[in-house]
């Protein structure tokens, strides 16, 4: 057939084909396929693959591809990375997708870092750590052994833990190695604070002393108390906790930058002014029950914006600007949890059996870690939280070091540490 005649025939048959129903079109194609030879079938196969298996990530502009990828969950994205090198390259280059995935896991994001591959690696690291938390496998334990009598005083800073004991000694430990950096002879210690050069101790002998780490010499001795000297945020006899902090928001009674004094007993939290007045009047009293039927736990968190305290019912959070209760986080399955730390994303709590991590976004306990039988009496054991920056969101670097420490009946110190990333 001549080319011109062929084109005329093709136009006519095309018009007829378009007038058919879908069923008739299918039957026509089936008939034509049955009449085709190897050359025609190969041609049909090559063209069908191009028509039906179009790689939209390759054909679409990169901006549109990124927009579509944002609607997929991270696990689906990781699966899509296995489709082809092109898909892996495009998906791995979408910074916003992986940053959002990390944020949803409670990880801190530095928006100045725009390397998409970096955030993909961070996400993979984050998903591993969150799985460890959910499986209760994120921590490991260690012990510090060296004292020969009860250890009451504990203080942690920058990877170093100071312990003060009734054996008339204080020791400074490197938590990462478990090695004792300094050990000096002191008096009995009820409280300890330290820096690189010196140690300050409050004692059961009613005095305060300052010591030099390098020589062990006592450089200052302060007398005047008529009872044991405890740390500033703990009073054993009155069960009153005192917290001093700068205000960070404008409230009904304070402005940003004002120093705020908070004190809490078993039923109330009181807010006091810090000024030149000798006899200060309480500015505001916060409570969780007017009839004092609900007791507060003797640990108070205040960051200048929010006040948080635990109770028999759960965690209470007040907005310092208005003094209103923002939320009550109840833990019906576990009562009387004590508060160790509170951040933007996580809270650290404990009871006599376990250390708990709460996801504050879902208000659920996501992990726990068993604790040993430490002394239950008020003057029996001390305990403290370690690194706290991770409570505002993990970042792949702040989930290291000390999580929790407590003194034990055998005079050792039990440590709960972050397990290294696999």
Image (tube, helix red, strand yellow):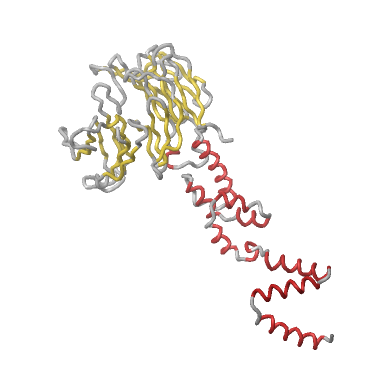
Regarding residue 194, the answer to whether it shows in the image is: no
Q: Quadrant of residue 122?
A: top right
Rendered location of residue 111, percent (x, y): 49, 52
Q: Position of 394 compared to 363: left or right?
A: right
Residue 39: image location, x then y, percent: 83, 70
Q: Position of residue 85 (x, y in %)?
A: 68, 54
Q: Quadrant of the N terminus?
A: bottom right
Judged left or right of residue 165, residue 270 is: left
In the picture shown, does residue 140 fall above or below 53?
Answer: above
As rendered, which of 346 and 384 lies closer to the eye? 346
Residue 9 higher or lower than 153, as above or below: below
Percent coordinates x, y for residue 113 in the rendering: 53, 50
Residue 18 visible in the shown view: yes
- Residue in the foreground of this view, choosing between 117 and 243: 117
Q: Which picture quadrant has residue 313?
A: top left
Q: How many marks?
A: 0
Question: Which quadrant of the rendered structure holds the C terminus?
Answer: top right
Q: Is residue 203 above or below residue 251?
A: above
Q: Is residue 180 left or right of residue 80?
A: left
Can you tell which quarter of the image residue 232 is in? top left
């Amino acid at each position: 057939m001549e080319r011109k005649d062929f084109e005329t025939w093709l136009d006519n048959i095309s018009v007829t084909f378009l007038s058919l129903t879908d069923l008739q079109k299918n039957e026509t194609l089936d008939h034509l396929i049955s009449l085709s030879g190897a050359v025609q079938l190969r041609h049909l196969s090559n063209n069908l693959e191009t028509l039906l298996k179009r790689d939209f990530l390759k054909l679409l502009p990169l901006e549109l591809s990124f927009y579509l990828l944002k609607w997929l969950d991270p696990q689906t994205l990781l699966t899509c990375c296995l489709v082809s090198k092109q898909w892996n390259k495009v998906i791995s280059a979408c910074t916003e997708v992986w940053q959002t995935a990390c944020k949803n896991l409670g990880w801190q994001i530095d928006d100045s870092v725009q390397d998409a591959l970096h955030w993909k690696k961070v996400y993979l690291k984050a998903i591993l750590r969150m799985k460890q938390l959910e499986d209760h496998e994120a921590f490991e334990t260690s012990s510090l052994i060296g004292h020969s009598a009860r250890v009451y005083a504990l203080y942690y800073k920058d990877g170093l833990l100071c312990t003060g004991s009734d054996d008339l000694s204080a020791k400074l430990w490197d938590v990462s190695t478990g090695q004792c950096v300094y050990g000096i002879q002191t008096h009995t210690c009820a409280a300890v604070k330290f820096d690189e050069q010196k140690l300050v101790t409050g004692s059961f002998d009613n005095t305060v002393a300052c010591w030099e780490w390098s020589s062990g010499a006592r450089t200052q001795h302060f007398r005047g108390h008529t009872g044991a000297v405890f740390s500033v945020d703990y009073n054993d006899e009155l069960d009153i906790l005192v917290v001093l902090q700068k205000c960070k928001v404008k409230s009904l009674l304070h402005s940003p930058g004002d120093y705020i004094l908070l004190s809490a007993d078993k039923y109330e939290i009181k807010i006091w002014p810090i000024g030149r007045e000798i006899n200060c009047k309480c500015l505001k009293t916060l409570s969780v029950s007017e009839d004092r039927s609900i007791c507060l736990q003797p640990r108070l968190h205040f960051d200048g914006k929010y006040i948080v305290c635990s109770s028999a019912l759960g965690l209470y959070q007040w907005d310092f600007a208005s003094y209103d209760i923002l939320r009550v986080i109840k833990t019906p399955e576990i009562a009387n949890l004590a508060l160790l730390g509170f951040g933007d994303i996580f809270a650290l709590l404990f009871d006599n059996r376990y250390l708990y991590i709460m996801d504050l976004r879902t208000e659920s306990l996501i992990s726990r870690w068993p604790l040993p039988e430490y002394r239950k009496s008020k003057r029996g054991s001390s305990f403290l939280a370690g690194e706290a920056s991770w409570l505002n969101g993990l970042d792949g670097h702040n989930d290291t070091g000390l999580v929790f420490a407590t003194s034990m009946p055998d005079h050792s110190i039990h440590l709960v540490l972050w397990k290294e990333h696999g």
